[in-house]
Amino acid sequence: MIKFYELVSSLNSKCFFSPNTWKTRMCLLHKGVQFETIPVTLLDVRGDLAHRSNKPDIYVPAIELPDGQFIYDSFHIAEWLENTYPDQPSLFTGDGQSTNKSHLGHITMGKNYARMIDLGLGASKPEWAVWFDLFFPQLDQLISDEKLSNYFRSDARHGPQGYQKLMSLDRQDLIRRAKMNIQPLVQILQERPNEYFQGKHPGLVDYVIFGRYAYCRMLDSQLTKQIWEDQGEELSIWIDKLSKAYDEHALKIFQNSH
């Protein structure tokens, strides 16, 4: 069985907060792949996981195949899943067809669309993304282990005075910017009733966006509702459908995270 390495704040935590690992989790479910979740902390990734994989630059999400091979990076994993499970619905076409029945041009176009969203809304770089900054205080509170907390707050993690800068940001301005990020999503769903972002069926574009939602939901459900569900009925319905997809997999995690 595939081992799926999931980022947590402590090894006894069920709060799966990483938006990138959520992408991979949903992709594995989409392709019908059985997997075992292995929780790891930031320090585990830098230590034990790097040692076991013999990849000093490894990061999560990462999967370990039964033969001991490691694959990491959510987009690389999605591409591997697409090629390895061609009889299952494509991650990139949004039409519910299996990969081996889909036109290569359709797959390529959908993959490019997913990559564009992944590098934009799905990213955490503060130059254009607001999500990491906005929920940083909640993430900081989540980390209770002293050693891990010291690393998380260190200049080595965030740069000189990075922690202090992140904690002093204007929260109301960040909320305003987050809501602005969401508005195009609402508009798209209004223009395409009862569809997903990838198409008539969900795909990687949806999982990238849902990963960002799940990150917010795991850290602060009330603020998440204000920023996401309350922005439009269409978006709220989309969230509900993906939360309940695959035998309510995501919903069960949300309900059991604390």
Image (cartoon, rainbow, N blue to C red):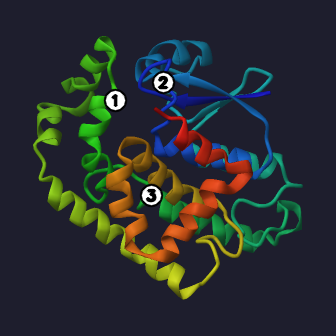
- First in residue order: circle 2 vs circle 1: 2
Q: Is residue 45 above or below residue 21?
A: above
The answer, for residue 79, to whether it is visible in the render is no
What is the quadrant of residue 120 in the picture? Answer: bottom left
Q: Which mark is residue 142?
A: 1
Q: Mark 2 and mark 3: span between their CA atoms?
A: 28 Å
| Mark 3 and mark 1 residues within 8 Å of each other at the beta carbon | no
Q: Identify residue type, mark 3.
A: Leu
- First in residue order: circle 3 vs circle 1: 3
Q: Nearer the viewer, mark 3 or mark 1?
A: 1
Q: Identify residue type, mark 2.
A: Ser
User: Which residue in the protein does label 3 denote?
Assistant: 119
**Does 234 sit left or right of 179 as displayed?**
right
Task: For mark 2, give the secondary structure.
Answer: loop
Q: Mark 3 and mark 1: span between their CA atoms?
A: 26 Å
Graded by Cα atoms within 10 Å as few (under 14), some (14 to 19) or many (20 or more), the crowding at tag 1 reads some
Q: Mark 2 and mark 1: span between their CA atoms?
A: 10 Å
| Mark 2 and mark 1 residues within 8 Å of each other at the beta carbon | yes
Q: Is residue 209 above or below residue 55?
A: below
- Which of these two is toward me, 193 or 123? 193
- Residue at horizontal 52%, vertical 33%? 60
User: Which residue in the protein does label 2 denote?
Assistant: 13
- First in residue order: circle 2 vs circle 3: 2
**Does 81 sit left or right of 109 as displayed?**
right
Q: Position of residue 4 (x, y in %)?
A: 65, 31
